[in-house]
């Protein structure tokens, strides 16, 4: 009986998240190309004012698609700071596994989700990354991240749920301000963010991001 109730509760929560994701996608899609580009420039300027991209530190970044915040300005900033950039590459769709591989500038491979990836996988251990700038659909003031539902980032950074491992890498969400929600019910598998950057500025959630 308890198992059935738990399953029903989990199904209800999953349905609720699907509805939230749908609304957030619609909200994001309503932004014009000019608004997205302007937000990307402002976000990059905010990142430039932090300590995250200094000292040639290895940076994890995503390749933006659709209405996501464009990451080309962030990539250019990393180049100027001599920070090597690594991009996510899915290695196992069934078990939601991915790695970070060096961005050599030729993204000739397209994965099943339609996301460009480096053709040659020069992989870096994820804990060797200093900071990861990652996409999201929604976030709240507590640092809870709502992704697209694939679970790849949560799977990769699952170890971060153990306190002693929280210091590396920093997880920084990249989003438009319109993607903020009052509260997101945090699931057991959710890995919280250290910070989020929108066109309005930087919000820190942990001391490690300062």
Image (tube, rainbow, N blue to C red):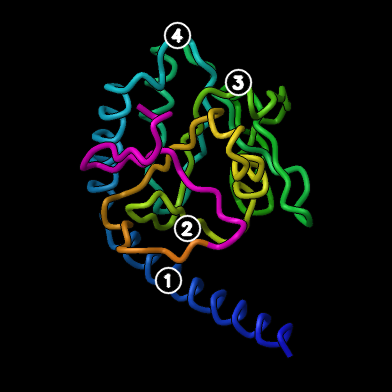
Which numbered dot is residue 104?
A: 3
SS for dot 3: loop
Q: Which residue is mark 1?
A: 20
Determine if the magenta segment contains residue 193: yes
Asked if 122 appears above or below 192 in the picture, the reply is above
Q: Earlier in the sequence, mark 3 or mark 4?
A: 4
Q: Earlier in the sequence, mark 1 or mark 4?
A: 1
Position of residue 55 measured from the top left corner of the image (x, y, whole percent): 45, 8
Foreground: disc 3 or disc 1: 1
Q: Which residue is mark 2?
A: 146
Looking at the rendering, the stretch of residues picked out in magenta corresponds to: 187-210
Where residue 43 sits, quadrant-wise, is: top left
Asked if 27 appears above or below 105 in the picture, the reply is below
Q: Earlier in the sequence, mark 2 or mark 4?
A: 4
Please state which of residues 120 and 129 is positioned toward the viewer in this rendering: 129
Q: Is residue 119 left or right of residue 38?
A: right
State the CA–CA distance, disc 3 to disc 4: 20 Å
State the CA–CA distance, disc 2 to disc 1: 9 Å
Quick one: quadrant of the C terminus? top left
Q: Earlier in the sequence, mark 2 or mark 1?
A: 1
Q: Which residue is mark 4?
A: 55
Label pair 2/4, CB-CB below 8 angstroms: no
State the CA–CA distance, disc 2 to disc 4: 31 Å
Where residue 205 sits, quadrant-wise, is: top left
State the CA–CA distance, disc 1 to disc 4: 39 Å
Foreground: disc 2 or disc 3: 2
């Amino acid at each position: 009986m308890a198992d059935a109730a738990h399953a029903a509760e989990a199904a209800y929560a999953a349905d609720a998240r699907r509805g939230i994701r749908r609304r957030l996608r619609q909200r994001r899609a309503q932004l014009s190309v000019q608004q997205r580009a302007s937000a990307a420039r402002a976000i990059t300027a905010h990142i430039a004012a932090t300590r995250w991209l200094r000292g040639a530190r290895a940076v994890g970044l995503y390749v933006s698609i659709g209405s996501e915040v464009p990451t080309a300005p962030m990539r250019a900033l990393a180049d100027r700071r001599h920070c090597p950039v690594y991009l996510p590459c899915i290695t196992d769709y069934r078990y939601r596994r991915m790695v970070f591989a060096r961005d050599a500038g030729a993204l000739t491979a397209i994965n099943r989700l339609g996301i460009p990836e480096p053709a040659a996988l020069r992989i870096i251990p994820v804990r060797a990354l200093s900071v990861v700038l990652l996409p999201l659909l929604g976030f709240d003031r507590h640092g809870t991240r709502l992704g697209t539902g694939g679970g790849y980032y949560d799977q990769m950074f699952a170890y971060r749920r153990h306190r002693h491992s929280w210091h590396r890498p920093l997880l920084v969400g990249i989003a438009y301000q319109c993607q903020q929600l009052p509260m997101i019910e945090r699931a057991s598998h959710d890995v919280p963010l250290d910070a989020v950057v929108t066109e309005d500025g930087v919000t820190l959630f942990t001391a490690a991001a300062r």
